[in-house]
Image: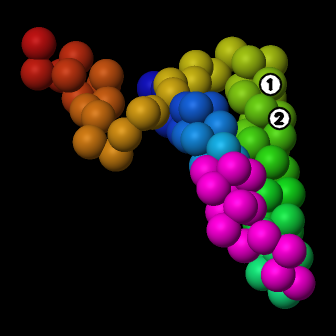
Amino acid sequence: MSIPLPSHIHYELLLQILERQTHFAVGQNGPQREKLQELVATVRKALAIQKQLETSCEIDNLPVEYRWSLNEVPREVVAQHD
């Protein structure tokens, strides 16, 4: 059984929205800008922690399966129906 993890592209998309669009909309507004910077740092940290988990799984020979959507059917379910 593989370990489902979000695809890295999800983090990248979220970061691009926050850094490009939200940052522009917030502008120089004090409290909102500070919260936005905190949010961006948290998303970056989450990605770094996920990468650490991936490395740990690789070391322990645990397969990782990246998920692009909640609507994906896990491979195990597909294999059971074949």
In magenta, the rendered stretch is 17-30
Q: Residue at x 85, y 65 (%)?
A: 37
Question: Residue 21's image quarter?
Answer: bottom right
Camera-side residue: 39 or 27?
27
- Callout 2, which amino acid? Gln
Residue at image mark 1: 55
Q: Is residue 60 above or below residue 30?
A: above
Mark 1 surroundings: few (<14), some (14-19) or many (≥20) residues within 10 A: some
| Element carrying mark 1 | helix
Question: Extreme bottom residue here?
Answer: 31
Camera-side residue: 50 or 40?
40
Question: Do the residues bearing badges 1 and 2 touch, measured as CB atoms within 8 Å?
Answer: yes
The figure's colour scheme reads rainbow
Instruction: Using the image, tell me which numbered label, if any, was put on residue 42.
Output: none
Image coords of residue 23 (percent x, y): 74, 62
Question: Residue 30's image quarter?
Answer: bottom right
Q: Residue at x 74, y 18 (%)?
A: 58
Camera-side residue: 76 or 49?
49
CA gap between label 1 and label 2 equals 5 Å
Residue at image mark 2: 52
Provide the major secondary structure of the magenta segment.
Answer: helix
